[in-house]
């Protein structure tokens, strides 16, 4: 029997079209975004007559449909002007390309398809700017350039590129460009210089989080395409929508919850998706998210966390002081650098900020103050931390110590 056979036999194929549930899928219908679509369309319609639309800043929390709406509008614009004689729609994801050179290279690649393209590296930025201007001007039309996740550029490279792009129209003779910046950072504009702020945000469109009812409609639309009707049990959609609305009104999370619920049902060999699968999916997603955070913390923070777990398992009171004692022992066994107590206290605060632990300041009268710590992760996550290969020497050392202890107890009994 092959290693896949058992899993293949048990598994039921419940998702008819997996692609529909992926967050990269662009639906043809975007319920509850009609107003935002209308607003943006009204602003950019002049481009169809070769007139420059205002720049737009689109803001809204994550998963509120900003990218989906803009891609949808891009597709519809292409239908209006299929040969792109008057306007072209260019989309750049600044999470992937976050430096000025990369952005201009990416834009130019979508305009010029011959060997005169800007090379991926090697030119000075001034040469890239000049070449880009000549490319654009030759086309004699309007370019709508969407910079999605625009805040990523600012974080890493400042706002020079925005200055260049928003002042380009002053140099262009025939073509025009219009920028649509998209961000989920509500404070983005506060980080821009006044000049750029007013240029980029000539028009503003805000996407608000979805409520439970809206999420239900969105999920229902996607579920109709992804599943056969009898697969989704009563209450599944409303449960997914209620959980996600309570969390953040994020459609991506709601879709993930539905997809993971169906995947759990498939793995269990069940014939439909039920509310119990949704609860299991929520737990799994929560655990995965915390594990993802723990993966990114430093080795020293992991040793501190491991020390807290040890105290938690011994049911000891956990204070900054006794965490430090165990941490010292663990650093010794792991041959890791030993940090000062103050630094370890900072790492404890960081774990607190990440929500992995809760630390409360406790006063002990004249004996001063300390922090009492509680673990805020469940058994699955504790096991994940303990199984980190970093802690292998610790595991071996502790089980050797335990064996010696048992042996001593046995010997004492014999005596
Ligand atoms: N009104 C809607 N109808 C159908 N699907 C939607 C709707 N709004 C969002 N979605 C879906 O939710 C997911 C997340 O949407 P999208 O990526 O557009 O969010 P976003 O606001 O750009 O998020 P982020 O700021 O994190 O990039 C996508 O799969 C998208 O298709």
Image (cartoon, rainbow, N blue to C red):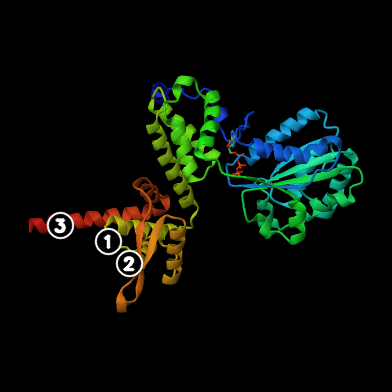
| SS at badge 3 | helix
* Residue of label 3: 409
Q: Residues within 10 Å of mark 2 (few under 14, many from 20)?
A: some
Image vertical order of residue 242 relative to residue 225, above or below? below
Residue 113 visible to the viewer: no
Q: CA distance from mark 1 to mark 2?
A: 9 Å
How many marks can you see?
3
The quadrant where ligand 1 appears is top right
Q: Nearer the viewer, mark 2 or mark 3?
A: 2
Q: Compare marks 1 and 3 and give the one earlier in the sequence.
A: 1
Q: Residue at 46% x, 35% y: name it.
A: 240
* Residue of label 2: 322
Q: Nearer the viewer, residue 194 or 383?
A: 194
* Residue of label 1: 316
Image vertical order of residue 238 relative to residue 12, above or below? below
Residue 27 % position (x, y): 62, 30
């Amino acid at each position: 029997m092959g290693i896949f056979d058992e899993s293949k036999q048990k598994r039921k194929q419940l998702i008819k079209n997996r692609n529909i549930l992926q967050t990269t899928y662009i639906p043809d219908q975007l319920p509850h975004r009609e107003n935002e679509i209308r607003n943006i369309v009204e602003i950019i319609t002049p481009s169809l007559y070769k007139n420059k639309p205002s720049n737009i800043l689109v803001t809204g929390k994550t998963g509120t449909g900003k990218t989906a709406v803009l891609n949808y509008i891009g597709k519809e614009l292409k239908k209006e002007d299929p040969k792109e004689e008057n306007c072209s729609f260019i989309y750049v994801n600044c999470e992937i390309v976050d430096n000025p050179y990369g952005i201009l290279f990416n834009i130019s690649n979508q305009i010029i398809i011959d060997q005169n393209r800007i090379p991926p590296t090697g030119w000075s930025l001034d040469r890239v700017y000049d070449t880009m201007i000549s490319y654009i001007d030759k086309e004699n039309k309007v370019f709508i350039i969407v910079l999605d996740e625009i805040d990523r550029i600012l974080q890493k490279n400042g706002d020079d590129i925005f200055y260049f792009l928003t002042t380009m129209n002053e140099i262009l003779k025939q073509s025009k460009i219009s920028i649509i910046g998209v961000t989920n950072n509500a404070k983005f504009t506060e980080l821009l210089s006044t000049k750029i702020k007013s240029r980029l945000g000539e028009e503003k469109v805000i996407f608000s989080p979805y409520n439970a009812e809206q999420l239900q409609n969105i999920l229902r639309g996607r579920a109709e395409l992804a599943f056969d009707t009898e697969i989704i049990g009563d209450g599944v959609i409303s449960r997914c929508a209620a959980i996600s609305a309570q969390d953040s009104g994020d459609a991506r999370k709601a879709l993930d919850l539905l997809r993971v619920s169906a995947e759990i049902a498939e793995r269990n060999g069940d014939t439909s998706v039920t509310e119990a699968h949704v609860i299991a999916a929520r737990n799994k997603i929560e655990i995965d998210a915390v594990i993802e955070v723990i993966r990114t913390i430093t080795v020293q923070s992991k040793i501190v966390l491991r020390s807290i777990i040890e105290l938690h398992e011994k049911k000891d009171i956990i204070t900054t002081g006794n965490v430090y004692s165990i941490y010292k022992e663990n650093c010794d066994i792991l041959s890791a650098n030993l940090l000062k107590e103050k630094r370890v206290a900072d790492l404890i605060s960081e774990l607190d900020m990440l929500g992995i632990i809760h630390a409360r300041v406790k006063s002990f009268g004249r004996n001063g103050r300390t922090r009492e710590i509680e673990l805020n992760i469940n058994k699955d996550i504790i096991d994940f931390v303990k199984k980190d290969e970093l802690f292998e020497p610790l595991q071996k050392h502790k089980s050797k110590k335990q064996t010696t202890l048992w042996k001593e107890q046995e010997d004492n009994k014999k005596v």
